[in-house]
Image (cartoon, rainbow, N blue to C red):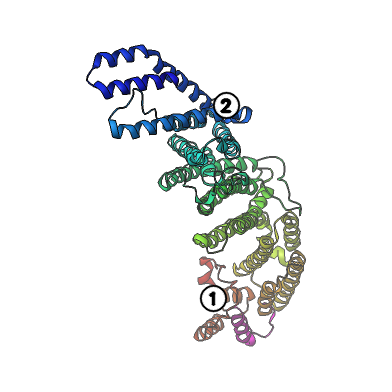
Amino acid sequence: MDLECSRDGLLHEQYRMDSGNTRDMSLIHSYFGSTQALSDELAKQLWMVLQRCLGTVRRDPTLLVSVVRIIEREEKIDRRILDRKKQTGFVPPGRPKNWKEKMFTVLDRTVTTRIEGTQAGTRESDRMWLVRHLEIIRKYVLDDLIVAKNLMAQCFPPHYEMFSNLLRMYRQALSTRMQELAAEDLEANEIVSLLTWVLNTYTSAEMMGNAELVPEVDASNLEPLLSPNVVSALLDTYMSTLTSNIIAWLRKALETDRKDWVKETEPEADQDGYYQTTLPAIVFQMFEQNLQVASQISEDLKTKVLVLCLQQMNSFLSRYREEAQVYKEEHLRNRQHPHCYVQYMIAVINNCQTFKESVVSLKRKYLKSEGEAGVSLSQPSMDGLLDAIAKEGCGSLLEEVFLDLEQHLSELMTKKWLLGSNAVDIICVTVEDYFNDFAKIKKPYKKRMIAEAHRRVVVEYLRAVMQKRISFRSADERKEGAERMVREAEQLRFLFRKLASGSGEDVDGYCDTIIAVAEVIKLTDPSLLYLEVSTLVSKYPDIRDEHISALLAMRGDASRDMKQTIIETLEQGPAQASTDYVPIFKDIVVPSLNVAKLLK
């Protein structure tokens, strides 16, 4: 300072006396030649202290105060010289120094370097590189700002607004760094990490919303680190990648599950003893993880991810349905394989109920309102698809049952049956045996399956009646056959009551059909046939002409004219079905070969 003062004083005097005398001016410059180097050396020392100011203020705040005093002193000299310039036009060499401005430039560069220098690894060396990088930034920035507010600001004059300026520098450096990261080719999990940090962590109590920074920092008024366009582009990339990932994960999960279906060991059971596979748990665990991740970013993204999961679930269930169908077809080609076909088909059926419950649970957890984003619209179609898969699965199992019943059903209404066949005993034992396995089916499906098995056994029984396997030759035979039919109807009724016990299912109606048909067979007075058949038709409006013809042919005593009269009379006033009537005859086809003969 002394050297500068002397030099500048002499130069000013020389300028005032004879500004055009360059020789004398150069002589003074030459004499004080090392003064500028000393000033530059001092500046270098000042900038070094400022670069380490956050550490210095903790260890030796007086050193930082000295730096600030020197800068402030030079600022005053700058102002004095600039004021004098207005009067004289003279400015000494190296002035104005603008050290305050340079100080802020140094601090700005220091903050930028500090933020950039926190990246410790790369994706190749560390899968969690971005998470670590962002966490180090969070910690450094929070620590630095707390120190700046509590210790550093006191070392500077108030008009420097040191904390506000540092806050601006950190925000700008963070924004620049986040934009650089956003421009990289980030993976889906990295996009989540970045957006979670930018949109939530940055303004949270763990960072800018920290109590130690209040009231100087108002986290709610901070400008966003990334523009809405950049955030939107990142979210689009994330959703696109997530869609591909979910499709791949679901395909893999189904492939793994499908391999289990051919195992020699039974599937596991849940706590209530119902067979299941791990597929629903795996699928919904995956959905849950992605929804939890999306929830960290924003409500909007969470809803979008939920919609995506439900959409992909629909596509997945269509593939699940196809696989179950293929599984059945492969089994029918060789019924010895797979060894646990019935058990795994039961698990497939039960999974449908688990899927239903899981969807409801997922929506309850992640949707604020049922109508949000129209998500509820996908539910009925998904429920319908799951019910269809379960229904087809139950149908496949019943097909298995009826393949084993085929031989015994073919004995009904034959001479062997009339003479005392035990076909219905075997049918009952076989059905009950299968339904012991079917006890592992969840209730809503099992209840429907019992009802369908009941209906189908009765239909097959009636089909045997309509196939004219036997024609009674006497009233005694008719009586014997009809009584046998009634006994067997009661036997079937007892079986299905037992199977449906506790389900609240009305199981009596189907077997009543067999008894009603038996009444027509048993009738001893042919003149009352029309009345008896009329009663039958009024009870069962789906009964057709060919059914009546076949029934009369089985009786063996109705003349052609009588058959014709009964049928023609009945045709004149077709019965109206009640709304709750379940058709039973519509599925029974009378063999075409017999129709012509039946009226003879």
Q: Earlier in the sequence, mark 1 or mark 2?
A: 2
Circle 2 sits on which residue?
63
Residue hosting label 1: 544
Q: Residues within 10 Å of mark 1 (few under 14, many from 20)?
A: some
Residue type, label 1: Arg
Cβ atoms under marks 1 and 2 closer than 8 Å: no
Q: Residues within 10 Å of mark 2 (few under 14, many from 20)?
A: some
Q: Position of residue 361 (x, y in %)?
A: 63, 57
Residue 511 percent location from the top left of the image = 69, 72
Horizontally, residue 561 falls left or right of residue 494, namely left
Q: Closer to the observer: label 1 or label 2? A: 2
Place of residue 126 in the rendered image (x, y in percent of width and height, measured from the top left): 57, 28
Whether residue 599 appears in this view of the structure is no
Q: Nearer the viewer, residue 387 or 343?
A: 387
- Tell me: 68 left or right of 491: left
The reply to whether the magenta stretch includes residue 388 is no
Q: Is residue 485 visible?
A: yes
**Front one among 589 and 521:** 589
- On screen, residue 254 above or below 381: above
* Range shown magenta: 521-540
Does the magenta segment cover residue 536?
yes
Pick the residue in front: 55 or 446.
55
* Residue at the left extreme of this rendering: 20
| x and y percentages locating residue 301 in the rendered image | 51, 51
Tell me the amino acid under the disc marked 2.
Answer: Leu
Q: Main secondary structure of the magenta part?
A: helix
Residue shown at the point (64%, 87%) measured from the top left: 528
In the rendering, which numbered label is found on residue 588?
A: none
